[in-house]
Amino acid sequence: MAERREAGSGEPALIWERPEPPSRPTPSPLSRERIVQAAIGLADTDGLESVSLRKVAAALDAGPMRLYRYLSTKEELLDLMVDAVYGEIPAPEPADGDWRGTLRSLAHHTRRAALRHEWFADLLAGRPHLGPHALAHTEASFAALHGAPGFDDIDTVLPVVDAVNAYLVGAIRKEISVLRAERVTGMDEEQWQRAAAPYLSRVLATGRYPTLSKVVQDAAHPDAETTFDAGLDYLLDGIAARIAR
């Protein structure tokens, strides 16, 4: 996580605690918000690898050194970008004990935000995000559970939120990996299946993979959103059953 030590201070000052410099009347005025939105635009178009302070400065018609008045490192820029996407995720309605509904709402809205900004999936895992929007998102997850029947102990709340987040991150990254593969190969799911079908038919005909053969031939194979929702339901059902015990 990006940090910076202020002169004369023994404590690191995170980007969230540093005030933004006052604006200056220039042909290309800057602000953290403008810098972040320019970086998000680059990442949405060409991926995270396209984001650098130099490229963001060029997109804003500003010298790269001017950006260092607003942030210190690329890591801080990534932190700001992630928090901006969290800011697009709607806050859930008051839970009133419906912890499943709240967690489902947060999961689906997070998935949709990641599909709008595919690079977001690459930054979801790892250490907790500490920006104000990310913290509000985390608070909503914990608050949906804490105090609900079976969740009086905060040590019960934490592993449940971790489990839901693990499913969410894995499912989102898998879905986005498929979308990226389609762009790289130029083949959508149906075209890829047709291309792989002869090989797969020969392999399954050996009889070495009988259960996989049944999955390929007989399973429904719903769309990505239905698959995401079904997996989430299985997880929430399991959590509810364990809490009930």
Image (spheres, rainbow, N blue to C red):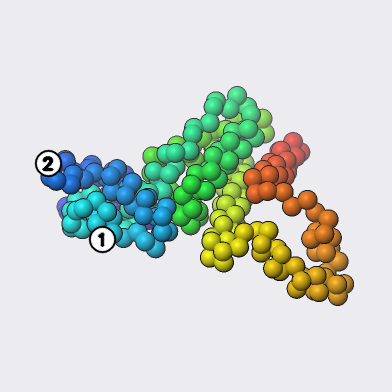
4 with respect to 8 (left or right): right
Foreground of the two, 32 or 18: 32
Q: Earlier in the sequence, mark 2 or mark 1?
A: 2
User: Which quadrant of the view contains residue 211?
Assistant: bottom right
The percent coordinates of residue 188 (x first, y second) are 62, 59
237 with respect to 57 (left or right): right
Q: Residue furthest left?
A: 25
Name the residue: 73% across, 40% down: 237
**SS at mark 2?**
loop
Q: Which residue is mark 1?
A: 54
The percent coordinates of residue 52 (x first, y second) are 31, 60
Q: Which residue is mark 2?
A: 25
Foreground of the two, 181 or 33: 181
The percent coordinates of residue 193 (x first, y second) are 70, 63
Q: Residues within 10 Å of mark 2 (few under 14, many from 20)?
A: few
Mark yes or no: residue 32 visible.
yes
Name the residue: 71% across, 64% down: 194
**SS at mark 1?**
helix
Image quarter of the N terminus: bottom left
Name the residue: 80% across, 54% down: 219
